[in-house]
Image (spheres, rainbow, N blue to C red):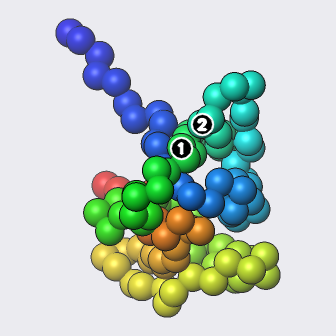
Amino acid sequence: MTAFPAISRLVLYTKRMDQMVTFYETHFGYVVQRNPGDRIVELVPKSNGVHLLLHPAAKGTREGQAAVKLVFDVPDVAEFCAQAAERGLVFGPIHQADGYQFANTKDPSKNSVSVSSRAFLNKC
């Protein structure tokens, strides 16, 4: 049987490279990895997770995609949002879903970003 590949990297097109690096380093603990001569900046999570590849956007590119949302798993949404606010990142209201919570914000390139406790549901 053939093994199916998993998503390991996500490309985000941006006109705000430095702001994006700072945003994901500061608020989600990513570490920058740059290769000489490569225009893509790779952001590597400190724990398991998807690598974010920041790619310079062309001049005519519209930033932010309504059809894509980056979701970060956190056990306590309210606590994470409070700590993020101390670092200058404000989330919208905390929403109660079916057994979990989530809150939304935008990154500097207007991509939708969410923190969610869904991954911590007790599944029977």
Q: For mark 1, what is the residue?
A: 55
Residue furthest top in the image: 1
Look at 44% across and 64% down and name the residue there: 63
Residue 105 is situated, as x and y percent measured from the top left of the image, at 52, 76
Which badge, 1 or 2, comes first in the chain's sequence? 2
Look at 54% across and 43% down and name the residue there: 55
Look at 69% across and 62% down and name the residue there: 19
State whether residue 6 appears in this view: yes
Q: Are marks 1 and 2 in contact (CB under 8 Å)?
A: yes
State whether residue 115 appears in this view: no
Side (left or right) of 116 relative to 86: left
Residue type at mark 2 is Ile
Residue 101 is situated, as x and y percent measured from the top left of the image, at 45, 77
Side (left or right) of 47 relative to 92: right
Number of residues whose C-alpha sits closer than 10 Å to that of mark 1, classed few (under 14), some (14–19) or many (20 or more): some
Number of residues whose C-alpha sits closer than 10 Å to that of mark 2, classed few (under 14), some (14–19) or many (20 or more): some
Instruction: Reply above or below: 61 against 117.
Output: above
Q: In which quadrant is the C terminus drawn?
A: bottom left
Q: In which quadrant is the N terminus drawn?
A: top left
Residue furthest bottom in the image: 93
Residue type at mark 1 is His
Q: For mark 2, what is the residue?
A: 40
Mark sitting on residue 18: none
Residue 65 is situated, as x and y percent measured from the top left of the image, at 36, 64
Q: Nearer the viewer, residue 91 or 83?
A: 91
